[in-house]
Image (cartoon, rainbow, N blue to C red):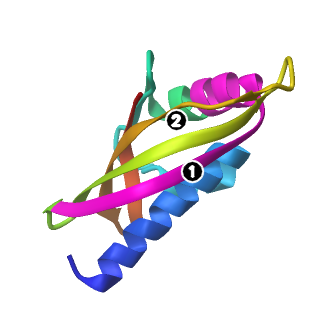
Amino acid sequence: MDEKTAAELEELVEKYRRLVSTQDRALYDEVFSSTRDVSLVSIRHTYLGDKGIYEDFLVGAVRASYRTIELVREELSMRLIAEDTALIIFGYHTECERRETGEPYGIAGLETQVAVREDAGWRLVHVHYSK
């Protein structure tokens, strides 16, 4: 993988991290593909399409559960699996504050992302969290 592609993919991961923290709709549109089917698998649920990922996962689950959340990326591995498709894997942990109680909370695990190169740049088509 060339340096430019690696930098673009790393920036995509950073945008995704910010998206998890902010649940910002405009940022969602910069991160996820708008031309392909998208999916996200969390620890126990599958979210499909924009409604599933943005409304049900980011707003309905993340924002509803946590007053604050930070997705902390650990080691990062990226590789092209086709000219316009990349596999991104990294360890993560979260630093959260529960909305109802204010108590700290977090999980840790591995995250796998599949990104595709589109006219607008690299976009995610699939995210999978494992604990």
Report which quarter residue 106 is drawn in.
Answer: top right
Q: Is residue 119 visible?
A: yes
Q: Residue 95: horizontal and vertical position, in percent?
A: 67, 40
Q: Amino acid at mark 2?
A: Asp
Q: Residue 7: horizontal and vertical position, in percent?
A: 40, 77
Q: Most extreme residue toward the left, as rendered?
A: 82
Q: Secondary structure at mark 2?
A: helix
Between the C-alphas of marks 2 and 1, the distance is 24 Å
Q: Which of the two residues, 26 or 109, is positioned nearer the viewer here?
A: 109
| 100 left or right of 53 in image | right
Residue lying at 58% horizontally and 27% vertically, measured from the top left: 57
Q: Which residues are magenta?
A: 55-80
Residue lying at 41% horizontally and 47% vertically, measured from the top left: 91
Which label number is shown at residue 72?
1
Q: Which of the two residues, 67 or 52, is positioned nearer the viewer here?
A: 67
| 31 left or right of 86 in image | right
| 55 left or right of 97 in image | left
Q: Are marks 2 and 1 in contact (CB under 8 Å)?
A: no
Q: Residues within 10 Å of mark 1 (few under 14, many from 20)?
A: some
Q: Residue 34: horizontal and vertical position, in percent?
A: 45, 49
| 97 left or right of 54 in image | right
Residue lying at 49% horizontally and 69% vertically, measured from the top left: 11
Q: Amino acid at mark 1?
A: Val
The residue beneath circle 2 is 50
Q: Is residue 24 visible?
A: no
Q: Is residue 112 magenta?
A: no
